Amino acid sequence: MNRLQTFIDNVALVVRSTGDEHEIDEHEITARVGELLSALLAEGYRLPPELTRASSTRHLTYPMHIAPDESWSMASVVWDLGQRTNVHSHETWGVVGIYAGVEHEIRYLKPTSSTPSGPLTPAGGARWTPGQVTVCCTTDDDVHAVAAVGGEPTIGIHVYGGNIGTTKRREYDPETGEVRWFVSGWDKP
């Protein structure tokens, strides 16, 4: 069996066996998926070339796997040099492994219903390099922006709860806290 199929089978097992349908433990899922993704990258898994192509106009999200029940999905996300995302949420759990390039992540405190609207509060940042894996989000902590920095496009392998291409998510204006809802969709390799 190939490395990718083994990874997919193992993530499916983690998602099915962690918690029950009423109480999913996102922190346990992300820890276990993170270990699996670290191993996949350490074993030298190679993405097909069509899932590593950048666009000069925006970052691309290529689907690698969507669970039949849409309980989780996997994507190759590619940023060309200097591209960045807007500040956004995920509305689910997620784990990211850097495949190539350098990703600069800027985190923000997630606004709550009791938080008055206003500027978002920065909560630190990090630079992620090839082979590194991070929990990008859980539903209680999932507001950030990312940028491709360095001398080559940045490519990440992302694993999310749900079908991230069809999930309704928030985009924030960090200066005002204003929210716009969006669905990112999927790009075709």
Image: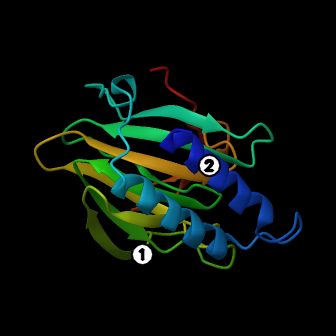
The residue lying at 58 percent from left, 69 percent from top is: 32
Q: Position of residue 153 (x, y in %)?
A: 22, 39
Quarter of the picture holding the N terminus:
top right
Query: Could you say which quadrant of the image residue 120 lies in?
Result: bottom left
Is 181 displayed left or right of 162 in the figure?
A: left
The residue lying at 58 percent from left, 47 percent from top is: 6
Question: Can residue 180 be seen here?
Answer: no
Quarter of the picture holding the C terminus:
top left
Q: Position of residue 7 (x, y in %)?
A: 56, 50
Q: Quick one: label 2, few (<14), some, or many (20+) residues within 10 Å?
A: some
Q: Which residue is mark 2?
A: 169
- Tag 2: residue type? Arg
Determine contact: label 1, label 2, CB under 8 Å.
no
Q: Which residue is mark 1?
A: 121
Closer to the camera in the image, 143 or 24 = 24
Is 35 displayed left or right of 124 in the figure?
A: right
Q: Is residue 81 above or below residue 40?
A: above
Closer to the camera in the image, 107 or 92 = 92
Closer to the camera in the image, 8 or 19 = 8
Is 39 displayed left or right of 90 in the figure?
A: left
- Tag 1: residue type? Thr
The residue lying at 70 percent from left, 52 percent from top is: 12
The residue lying at 34 percent from left, 65 percent from top is: 106
Is 145 displayed left or right of 111 in the figure?
A: left
